[in-house]
Amino acid sequence: MQYVIYFLLALFATSVGSLTGMGGGVIIKPLMDVLGDYNVQTIGIISSITVFSMALVSVAKQIKAKTKIPFETAIPLAIGSVFGGFIGERVLSYIVNALKINGIVTVIQNTILAILILCVFLYMKNKNRIKSKELKGVFVSLAVGIFLGVCSSFLGIGGGPINVALIIYLFSVNTKTATVCSLITILFAQISKLTTVAFTTGFSEFDLSVAPVMIIGAILGGFIGASLNKKCKEETVEKAFNGVQLLVLGLTIFNIFSNLTID
C-alpha cells in the first residue's frame, strides 16, 4: 500500500509541477513531511530523484514540441543553479549535523518555504500592477540561478513557484516561458544536488525503497503535465499555479505546528 501511495503522490505532484513549472518537489517535500516515514535528508534525496526524472521528461518534450525557449536566459540560469544546488546541499548537511534533531530542521525548512510561497502568491495575484524589471545579461542570470539552486537544494523542493515568479518579475516574460526556464533550472539544480550526494555521503545510507515507483510516477507526470501545458491557456496555467501555492502553504503550516508540538 505504501508503494501505491507514493506512486500516486509522485504522479499528482509532477503532473501539476510540469504543467505550472513548479517542478513537483514543492508538493512532494511537504507531503512527505506530513506522512513522516523518512528523515529530512532522505526526503530531500527522494524528492530530488523524483523531480529530476520529471524535469528530464518535461524539458525533452518541450524541446521536441519546438517550444520557444530563451536560451540566452535559460542556459545561465541552469549553470547558476548547478553551483547553487551544491551550496544548498552543503548548507543542509551542515545544519542537520549541527542540530541533530529532524523536527527542528523540518520546521526551519517549512517556515522558509511558507514565507516564500506567501510572497510568491501575493506577487502572482498582483503582478499586473507590479512593473517587471526586464533584466538581461549572463551575470544577472547566473546570480539568479545560484539563488534558485540554493533554495531548490536546501528546501528539497526542486524549484517550485519561486523560480516561476522570480523569472517573470526579473526578466519580464510570460508564465509559459517562465515555466520552461524554471524546468531547465530545476533539471540542472537536481543534477548538482544528486552529484554532490554521490561524491560525498553516497546513497547507500538512505532508504530509497520507494524511489523506483516515484520515478515511474514522475515520468508519467512529466508527460501529462507537459502535454497539458501545451494545450492549456495562459490563464489556466496561472490558476493552477496559484491553486497549488495555497495547497502547499497549508501543508507547510501544518508541518510547522505538528513538529513544534512533538515532545
Image (tube, rainbow, N blue to C red):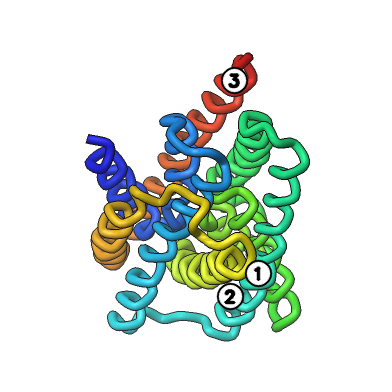
Q: Position of residue 2 (x, y in %)?
A: 28, 37
Question: Which amino acid, mark 2?
Answer: Ala
Q: Tell us which disc is closer to us: 3 or 2.
A: 3
Relative to 4, does residue 148 appear above or below in the rendering?
below
Q: Earlier in the sequence, mark 1 or mark 2?
A: 2
The Cα–Cα distance between marks 1 and 2, rounded to whole angstroms, is 6 Å
Residue identifier under label 2: 78
Residue sitting farthest toward the front? 204
- C-alpha span from label 1 to label 3: 31 Å
Estimate the spatial distance between the alpha carbons at disc 3 and disc 2, rounded to whole Å. Answer: 35 Å
What amino acid type should be assigned to the residue bearing mark 1? Gly
Label 3: which secondary element: helix
Q: Residue at x 61, y 57 (%)?
A: 153
The quarter of the image holding the N terminus is top left
* Type of the residue with mark 3: Phe
| Horizontal side of residue 180 vs 109, given as left or right | left
Q: Do the numbered discs 3 and 2 sit on residues whose CB atoms are within 8 Å?
A: no
Give whichever of 82, 202 is nearer the camera. 202
The residue at the point 62 percent across, 29 percent down is: 103
Q: Dot 1: what SS? A: helix
Q: Which residue is mark 3?
A: 257
Q: In the rendered structure, are the residues bearing label 1 and label 2 in contact, judged by CB atoms less than 8 Å apart? A: yes
Q: How many marks?
A: 3
- Report the residue at 61% width, 70% height from top: 199
Please tell me whether residue 10 is drawn above or below residue 138 in the rendered image: above
Q: Does the residue at mark 1 contact the one at mark 3 (Cβ under 8 Å)?
A: no
Q: Which one is in front, 33 or 22?
A: 33
Q: Is residue 209 left or right of residue 1?
A: right
The vertical placement of 105 against 134, above or below, is above
Residue 76 screen position, x and y as percent: 63, 80
Q: Which residue is mark 1?
A: 145
Of tags 1 and 3, the one toward the viewer is 3
